[in-house]
Image (cartoon, rainbow, N blue to C red):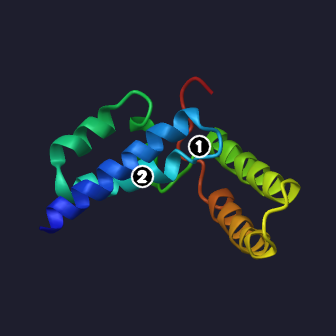
Amino acid sequence: MFRTLWLLIGLTSLALGIAGVVLPLLPTTPFVLLSAYCFARSSPRLHDWLLGHKLFGPLIRNWEQHRAIAPRAKLLAVVSMAVVFGISFLVGAPTRVIIIQAVILPATCLFILTRPNGPRRLSE
């Protein structure tokens, strides 16, 4: 039963992560990392497929092996959070939404920015 639940959460998270590739306000990285976590508990075949994926594999391996986030991913995450906050403010989102974002987004940015960058690539 729990394997099925992990699998459903992983598939849903992967779908959201894939949507985040083309939708600028939907984050890709956290959903793909959640998918890898869920697949590791439910489907070794899907976990291996995700690790071997051209786009998502390096991101997941960097996190699993080094608990690291690449500088480019950090930049994209911080910029997208700033854009979301700015849009919310400009469109007149309810005050409680602005307050929640004002508390959560900086904390999330701090977490992201304090993660290591991971190993340097040979091309750098």
* Left or right relative to 23: residue 75: right
Residue 118 image position (x, y, % from top left): 54, 47
Disc ID at residue 5:
none
- First of labels 2, 1 by sequence position: 2
Residue 97 image position (x, y, % from top left): 73, 70
Q: As shown in the figure, which amino acid type bears the numbered disc 2?
A: Leu
* Visible residue check, residue 99: yes
Residue 94 image position (x, y, % from top left): 78, 70
Q: Nearer the viewer, mark 2 or mark 1?
A: 2
**Residue at the spot of label 2:** 33
Q: Eyeballing the image, is 75 above or below 85?
A: above
The residue carrying pointer 2 sits among few (fewer than 14), some (14 to 19) or many (20 or more) residues within 10 Å by Cα, namely: many
**Residue at the spot of label 1:** 70
Could you tell me which quadrant the N terminus lies in? bottom left
- The quarter holding residue 62 reads top left
Q: Give the secondary structure at mark 2.
A: helix
Instruction: Give the residue at the far right of this rendering.
Output: 90
Q: Residue at x 65, y 45 (%)?
A: 25
Q: Is mark 2 in CB contact (under 8 Å) with mark 1?
A: no
Instruction: Give the residue at the far left of this rendering.
Output: 1
Q: Eyeballing the image, is 38 above or below 28?
A: below
Residue sitting nearer the eye, 57 or 91: 91
Q: Eyeballing the image, is 4 above or below 59?
A: below
* Left or right relative to 108: residue 64: left
* Visible residue check, residue 61: no
Residue sitting nearer the eye, 67 or 11: 11
* Left or right relative to 99: residue 20: left
Could you tell me which quadrant the C terminus lies in? top right
- The quarter holding residue 102 reads bottom right
Residue 116 image position (x, y, % from top left): 59, 54
* Left or right relative to 115: residue 58: left
